Amino acid sequence: MSIRIVLADDQQLVRSGLRVLMADHPDLEVVGEAATGEEAVEQVRLTRPDVVVMDIRMPGMDGIEATRWITAGHASTRVLMLTTFDEDDHVHGALRAGASGFAVKDMALDDILAAIRVVAAGDALIAPSVTRRLIADFVARRTAPPEHSARRLEGVTEREREVLTLVGRGRSNTEIAQDLFITVATTKSHVSRLLAKLGARDRVQLVITAYETGLVTPSNPAPYDDAGETRPGAAPALPGSASVDR
């Protein structure tokens, strides 16, 4: 079955370019376009897409507010935000609004298509340039008292805490299975139970929870330096499209 997509960007050229590119991929189907946040919300109501590719800066209702409306009213629709390197505040806002992924506008178009497929599959994706530094800063802005953090993890088993910690450190299911000497299938079951117990939409929100509850701290070494290059020996904070799984 094809992935149904709404393209939301105030630049016609961007929408047209993505539409033309997707025409060569039978698993991708553009079912609507929007130039404003209001139009994006309306297109989601009319077409019930699997994924909205959402620009952040649009006239009127911006992409973050549109994402908030979409994720609140259409649980099955996921939002892939388009961002740039210097829009840290917008990334934080999109996280709060419930976005499932972040693609950088200067990524190769094929990488953006790969990101759409990852998000449509129910997984989460953050472009390598949107590093753990941003997630850590996001969490620092809304630090919860210890008693609140403890309540957040009520009902979570010790093994699930271990899995949540590793998810927060950016480990894929395969890597978590290797770290804990369990099967990938068992890892996926733990992740699914964590999503249900914590009321999280996807893996991005599990990462945030791992930070908010103190299982992972901002003092952990960031896997990328300020230029976006991988540091030797550092595990990725949030994997790319090939390794993000549920």
Image (cartoon, grey):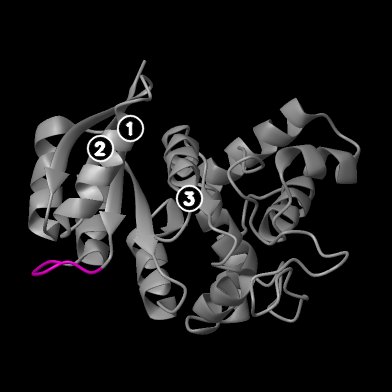
**Residue at numbered disc 1:** 22
Q: Mark 3 is on which residue type?
A: Ala
Q: Residue at x 20, y 56 (%)?
A: 9
In this view, 200 is above or below 243: below
Most extreme residue toward the top, as rendered?
1
**Majority secondary structure in the magenta region:** loop
In the rendered image, which residue does mark 3 sit on?
A: 108
Which residue is drawn at the image coordinates 64% and 63% (left, top)? Answer: 210
The residue most toward the right is 181
Task: Assess disc 2: are there few (<14), some (14-19) or many (≥20) residues with their C-alpha within 10 Å of its C-alpha.
Answer: some
Disc 2 to disc 3, how far (Cα)? 15 Å
Q: Position of residue 29 (x, y in %)?
A: 27, 27
Q: Nearer the viewer, residue 205 or 245?
A: 245
Check disc 1 and give the amino acid type. Met
Image check: 73 left or right of 170? left
**How far apart are the two marked residues, 1 and 3, measured between alpha carbons?**
13 Å
Asked if the residues shown at circle 1 and circle 3 are in contact, with their CB atoms under 8 angstroms apart, the answer is no
Residue 95: x and y in percent read: 41, 64
The residue under the point 75% across, 66% down is 230
Residues tagged 1 and 2 counted as in contact (Cβ below 8 A): yes
State which quadrant residue 231 falls in.
bottom right
Q: Is residue 6 left or right of residue 35?
A: right
> Would residue 27 be seen by someone viewing this image from the given angle?
yes
- Which of these two is toward me, 103 or 16? 16
Q: Which residue is mark 2?
A: 19
- Which residue type does callout 2 highlight? Arg
**Region rendered in magenta:** 57-61
Lower position in the chain sequence, tag 1 or tag 3: 1
- Report whether residue 8 is seen: no
Callout 1: few (<14), some (14-19), or many (20+) C-alpha neighbours within 10 Å? Answer: some
In this rendering, is residue 221 above or below 73? below
